[in-house]
Image: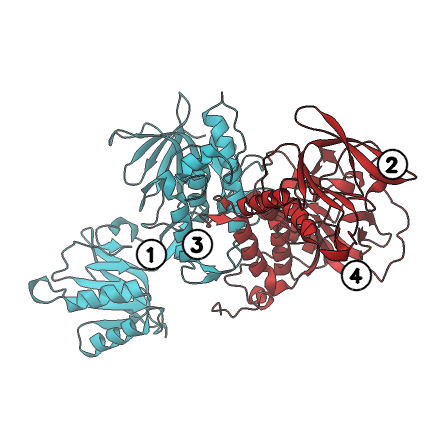
Chain colours: A cyan, B red
Amino acid sequence: MKSTGTLPFTSEPIQTDALVIGAGPVGLFQVFELGLQGITAHVVDALPYLGGQCIELYADKPIYDIPALPVCTGRELIARLEQQIRPFKPAFHLDQEVCELRRRDGGGFDVETSRGLRFQTQTVFLAAGVGAFTPRVLKVDGFEQFVGKQVFYREPDGKDVAGKDILVLGEGDDALRLALTLARTNGDGKAKSVTLMHRRDQFKASAGLIEQMREACDDGRMRFQVGQIIGCSAVEGQLKSVSIIDDLAHKSELPVSWVVALLGLSPRLGPIAGWGLDLDRKQVKVSTADFCTSEPGLYAVGDINTYDGKKKLIVCGFHEATLAAFAAAAYIRPDEIVHLQYTTASPKLHQLLGVSPLGN
Amino acid sequence: MKSTGTLPFTSEPIQTDALVIGAGPVGLFQVFELGLQGITAHVVDALPYLGGQCIELYADKPIYDIPALPVCTGRELIARLEQQIRPFKPAFHLDQEVCELRRRDGGGFDVETSRGLRFQTQTVFLAAGVGAFTPRVLKVDGFEQFVGKQVFYREPDGKDVAGKDILVLGEGDDALRLALTLARTNGDGKAKSVTLMHRRDQFKASAGLIEQMREACDDGRMRFQVGQIIGCSAVEGQLKSVSIIDDLAHKSELPVSWVVALLGLSPRLGPIAGWGLDLDRKQVKVSTADFCTSEPGLYAVGDINTYDGKKKLIVCGFHEATLAAFAAAAYIRPDEIVHLQYTTASPKLHQLLGVSPLGN
């Protein structure tokens, strides 16, 4: 595994037996299976909420192939898993990516997130699905230097918009809602101009928001522009304007103080790709006996892993998380024999689950 | 695979792509996963009802480790799976064991059940759990020759009890209920005597039945005897009496016309052990890529299989059934590419499931 240098001091690292990266259905069930082994987990996810792809891609769509759940939405599946893992009181650390992971000299791993949170953990479970869901970014020459200053990929909350020419990119609820909010600002805090831009005059946003946006354009509070950014101009290190091209291939220049691009989220493997694990086409190779990667103590479960016969199905991830938990228990407590016990009959598991033997 | 000779002619064999042996949770989910592949299955089980161990061992006990079902009883789990597989209209053939299985010359398998039902099937899925649940039998020298004539391991319904000395063995609801029913018979059809025997004066039966049994003993309609059978005497090929030993080691002789032993069910691997499959301590060895046994087209899923890392958990069986279904689809239709499709989005799967894209 690649060493990525000394971690910067932020705060005392959190000590834990298990760190789960990814709070999708498989990451959540990983917490459950670890809980049955008496192991409490910390969970990190790039999204600000639980559920991963289930919430990001099909929150309200029906899923039919979860065993013994003839139909449930992504949201329902996550709610059920949240309920199931409650007895094990996992600690969630959301809205942050794991950006560093390296093996400790004394065993286990040092992990750090994009928010500077640090962990010292015995085991790591990569349940990161197709990767971290992060905002889609614009590919415009010279744009990168302005990110976080004049170019934003999230709503720039708490920043002063007064007197600014603001260009909002996007076609979803979040883009239209932001443009309307900016267009509504009155008095001293008012933006100088608000432009919504999308490559065509069609939107994924809800009908109500589209209607409000049209009204705001008719009122002159904002305007809508069909087009895409193809370049930018800066003066003394400040972004001044963007070059745009519309659907008829006409080019024009638009003065901007800020560009806020809300183009949706896209998954990316992110720093995992640089951890030196055995990969096969961006998937992490694992053993089917324990779902361990090429690094002892580091497991990969769900859509992120690969092995002979692999199918990217939630039902398979549940199995993988189960065997990984058994393997991790043996890894963390090498002197104990890990017995298979059944939740129906085991007093030890009943105690961990906080239930009486009669299920109350 | 061992050839077991020519099958006796019984009726036209049932032609099918898939035969699932075992109607426990994994066998039922196997039907579901085959259904998603467009393959309709026939299912055989030794028990007269669906559910296998879930119903036989923990019908009313809570299970906590089915993913996204924080708690459910064995019975509830089976009911949910029954509902889930309904769109695929499986044909169930219950209360019979598969007693013959052999490879056909032209491909696929010939299968025959203990009731003489025959199948010609392309693929077979062993989802037989710990084996077929069959009645526990008595180990008494010389007893075997009377089984089905004077010794019964199931309630001998429809048989004339008039004038017979009947010994019922057991401690469960079924044993006490049968003894009480026989003791209640009046008039011409009356048994000569009814004795309930168990090795101690304690029962697993419900309190109400125990009370009724005590009353019937007090009334002289039946009697209860503490003891176990240690031998038997026959005259001219007819069972006449059994030797018993009680809890104080006293021996005595009890005249009997019939012995009905209701000692519960116990699983046994049965004829599977003789099919020539690669076994490891009575478990069927499989590949983790497709859960195929050493015989192409013959898959083993759930508690009956073994592989490196195997855990006998329902959640693992669900995964195994999923990969086995993919493998079987490729085996049955070698010229087609089996694509992974998602039930959330695939119109083909929606059609198979009989749902509209909006989940109605």
Nearest to viewer (mark 2 / mark 1): 2
Specify few, some or many for label 4: CA neighbours under 10 Å numbering under 14, 14-19, or 20 or more.
Answer: few
Disc 2 and disc 4: Cα gap in Å? Answer: 44 Å
Q: Residues within 10 Å of mark 3 (few under 14, many from 20)?
A: many
**Residue A147 position in % (x across, y down):** 26, 51
C-beta proximity under 8 Å, tags 3 and 2: no
Measure how far apart labels 3 and 2 are at the Cα level: 64 Å
Amino acid type of the residue that numbered disc 1 sits on in the rendered structure: Val
Q: Chain of mark 1?
A: A
Q: Secondary structure at mark 1?
A: loop
Residue B265 x, y percent position in the rendering? 67, 42
Q: Chain of mark 4?
A: B
Q: Quadrant of residue A20?
A: top left
* Residue at image location 52% in from the left, 70% down from the top: B356
Residue farthest to the left, as pictured: A188
Type of amino acid at the residue the image marks with label 2 = Ala
**Residue occupied by mark 1:** A140
Chain under numbered label 2: B
Determine the secondary structure under disc 3: helix
x, y percent for residue B15:
78, 61
Q: Are marks 2 and 1 in contact (CB under 8 Å)?
A: no
Dot 3 corresponds to which residue? A77
B347 lies above or below B280:
below
Quadrant of the image for the N terminus of chain A? top left
Cα separation between marks 3 and 4: 39 Å
Residue that label 4 marks: B14
Residue bearing the label numbered 2: B234
Q: Amino acid at mark 3?
A: Leu
Q: Residue furthest bottom?
A: A218
In the image, what residue type sits under mark 4? Ile
> Which residue is nearer to you in this view: B151 or B272?
B151
